[in-house]
Image: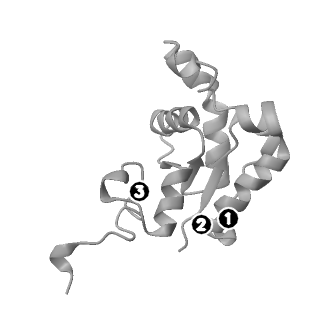
């Protein structure tokens, strides 16, 4: 079984700034890292994707219950893809979606885009794997005690 990934389109850079061309660039990088056959796009996506509810200061606002309620649609959208992981290129999206997954029982790890890029290059350190699921935690890890 292959691991499946979806990606969150960050509002600031996609919907509010550069639009679909930057969303297409994001997908090019993601598919290059995880393999096109392992990528499942959210519906709707790109400039029409749903906001996760963590940006614009909402993550730090103190209105946690309202933020989680707002994010319920995003959690449902991610679950509908059937993806094992949600990739986030924005730190606010990562924090919000990670909390949504825990709060609504999504059980999908949320991983930073840079983490997957480094993992694919074989340069992700053992101490940088906090958000990886058990299926990826040991990928490209050198264990001196088991080396020949």
The one nearer the camera, 61 or 44, is 61
In this view, 86 is above or below 67: below
Residue 61 placed where, x, y %?
A: 53, 13
Residue 1 placed where, x, y %?
A: 53, 74
- Is residue 115 in sight in this rendering? yes
Q: Which label lies toward us, 3 or 2?
A: 2
| Residue density around tag 2, few if under 14, some if 14–19, many if 20 or more, within 10 Å | some
Among the two numbered marks 1 and 3 on one chain, the one whose residue lies closer to the N terminus:
1
Among the two numbered marks 3 and 2 on one chain, the one whose residue lies closer to the N terminus:
2
Q: Which residue is mark 1?
A: 31
State if disc 2 and disc 3 touch (CB < 8 Å): no
- Residue 34 - label: 2
- Is residue 50 in sight in this rendering? no
Q: Which residue is mark 3?
A: 133
In this view, 29 is above or below 64: below
Q: Residue furthest bottom?
A: 148
Residue 123 placed where, x, y %?
A: 42, 64
Residue 95 placed where, x, y %?
A: 50, 34
């Amino acid at each position: 079984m292959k691991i499946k990934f979806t990606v969150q389109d960050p509002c600031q850079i996609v919907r509010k700034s550069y639009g679909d061309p930057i969303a297409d660039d994001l997908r090019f990088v993601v598919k290059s890292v995880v393999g096109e056959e392992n990528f499942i796009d959210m519906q709707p996506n790109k400039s029409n994707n749903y906001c996760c509810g963590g940006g614009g200061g909402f993550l730090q606002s103190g209105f946690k219950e309202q933020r989680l309620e707002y994010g319920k649609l995003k959690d449902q959208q991610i679950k509908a893809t059937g993806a094992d992981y949600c990739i986030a290129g924005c730190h606010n999206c990562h924090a919000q979606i990670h909390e949504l997954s825990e709060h609504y029982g999504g059980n999908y790890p949320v991983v930073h885009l840079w983490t997957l890029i480094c993992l694919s290059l074989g340069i992700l350190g053992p101490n940088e794997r906090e958000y990886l699921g058990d299926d990826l935690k040991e990928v490209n890890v050198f264990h001196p005690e088991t080396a020949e």
